[in-house]
Amino acid sequence: MFVARNDFPLWILINFYDLYRKQPQIMENMLKLVSFILLLSTFNCASSKQEASSQDATTAKTETAVINAKEMIDKGFSKGTITSSKSQDCPYILNVEQYKDNLDPVNLGEFFKGDIPDQVWVKFASLRMPSRCDTARPVNILEISKRTAE
């Protein structure tokens, strides 16, 4: 039986039904084979993508950290570490690797609303104002971003 219509999906269904009526064993085997191939190709694609992405992620992280550090230094950022202070006057102390003294970031709350990271990249400018605490000199943060551990 051959149906020549413009309804292509209907035509396929009718021809498969006709084949199934005449030779059901062949149709069942073909259906099992197509299902198995489809299932196998789905699992193969998913696992290879996952393995490739996990390998790429670890390589990318280490490369990004090295490139990121060089780029940030070239842009004028300094490596800094923020610690909480026991003094009420200056809640946080910023230690920059380039300098030996402690810094009091006056406007740190403008950049971070929640948790304040421990390690940062920072650009700052010294302030000509009286110090809020005895252990650090006041600075104004110009730019700051979170730094990943290297």
Image (cartoon, rainbow, N blue to C red):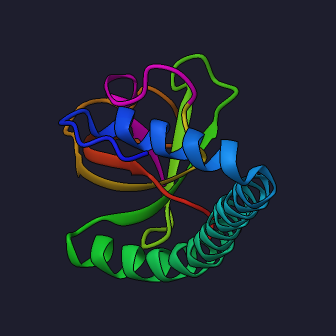
Q: Quick check: 30 left or right of 91?
A: right
The magenta stretch is: 102-115
Q: Nearer the viewer, residue 110 or 133?
A: 110
Q: Nearer the viewer, residue 110 or 33?
A: 33
The answer to whether residue 104 is magenta is: yes
Q: Nearer the viewer, residue 71 or 99?
A: 71
The quarter of the image holding the C terminus is bottom right
Picture coordinates of residue 58 (x, y %)?
A: 63, 75
The residue at the point 21 percent across, 37 percent down is 5
Q: Quick check: 3 left or right of 45?
A: left
| Image: 76 above or below 74 | above
Which residue is farthest front? 1
| Image: 112 above or below 55 | above
| Image: 139 above or below 43 | above
The residue at the point 56 percent across, 43 percent down is 18
Can I make out residue 135 in this image?
no
Q: How many marks?
A: 0
The residue at the point 70 percent across, 27 percent down is 86
Can I make out residue 23 in this image?
yes
| Image: 52 above or below 37 | below
The quarter of the image holding the N terminus is top left
Q: Nearer the viewer, residue 150 or 13?
A: 13
Q: Quick check: 66 left or right of 58?
A: left
The residue at the point 51 percent across, 26 percent down is 90
Picture coordinates of residue 27 (x, y %)?
A: 71, 54
The answer to whether residue 46 is magenta is: no
Picture coordinates of residue 123 (x, y %)?
A: 27, 55
